[in-house]
Amino acid sequence: MKKAIATPKAPAAVGPYSQGVQTGNLLFVSGQIPINPETGTIPEGIEAQTGQSLENIKAIIEAAGATLSQVVKCTVFLKDMNEFADMNKIYAEYFTEPYPARAAVEVSRLPKDVKVEIEAIAQLTTDLSSSNL
């Protein structure tokens, strides 16, 4: 069984995908680019873009009744690996030990030509298979 998770506090899906999908006690958060959901704008610079992407992830995770402390895995897609240290500085502000497992890869292009996209997997305390949804 799976359940779509959506919130207006993160950018709306603009295609055939969900902001997040819960199955069992796992939440899979779709890649989030740094669009401010209130204004539709994209901030300048890797640090601001990383922060906005993580705020979007945080909003989706919170819509599922969880927190960033429950994230077990992230994948970071960077337009330029030379900006890894600047991304990592902001990323470190959002997570505490034990840190999620993570991969970071450079890609040739991202939607809307942003500098970063981040996806996440969180382990929730509620399990869909044991609920009456």
Image: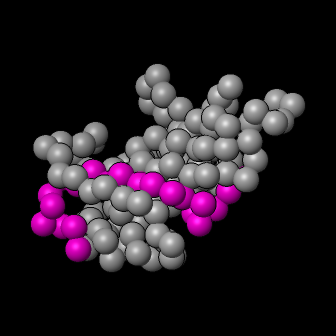
Q: Is residue 72 magenta?
A: yes
- Place residue 133 in its image quadrant: top right
> Taking 118 as reference, is 101 above or below it?
below
Q: How many marks?
A: 0
- Residue projecting furthest to the right: 132
Colouring mode (rainbow / by chain / secondary structure / one colour): one colour
Task: Tell me what residue is drawn at x 36 percent, y 63 percent.
Answer: 50
Q: Is residue 49 left or right of residue 21?
A: left
Task: Tell me what residue is drawn at x 45 percent, y 54 percent.
Answer: 73
Q: Is residue 107 left or right of residue 68?
A: left
Asked if residue 18 shows in the view, the reply is yes
- Residue projecting furthest to the top: 16
Most foreground residue, 127 or 133: 127
Query: The magenta stretch spans which residues?
Result: 65-85
Q: Quadrant of the N terminus?
A: top right
> Taking 92 as reference, is 109 above or below it?
above
Asked if residue 5 shows in the view, the reply is no
Most foreground residue, 27 or 36: 27
- Place residue 42 in its image quadrant: bottom left
Q: Is residue 11 left or right of residue 33?
A: right
Q: Is residue 105 magenta?
A: no
> Taking 81 as reference, is 131 above or below it?
above
Q: Position of residue 64 (x, y in %)?
A: 68, 48
Q: Position of residue 74 (x, y in %)?
A: 41, 54
Task: Tell me what residue is drawn at x 83 percent, y 36 percent.
Answer: 131
Q: Position of residue 109 (x, y in %)?
A: 18, 42
Most foreground residue, 84 or 26: 26
> Taking 86 as reference, is 120 above or below it?
above
Q: Is residue 44 left or right of residue 35?
A: left
Q: Position of residue 78 (x, y in %)?
A: 23, 54
Task: Tell me what residue is drawn at x 53 percent, y 42 percent.
Answer: 28
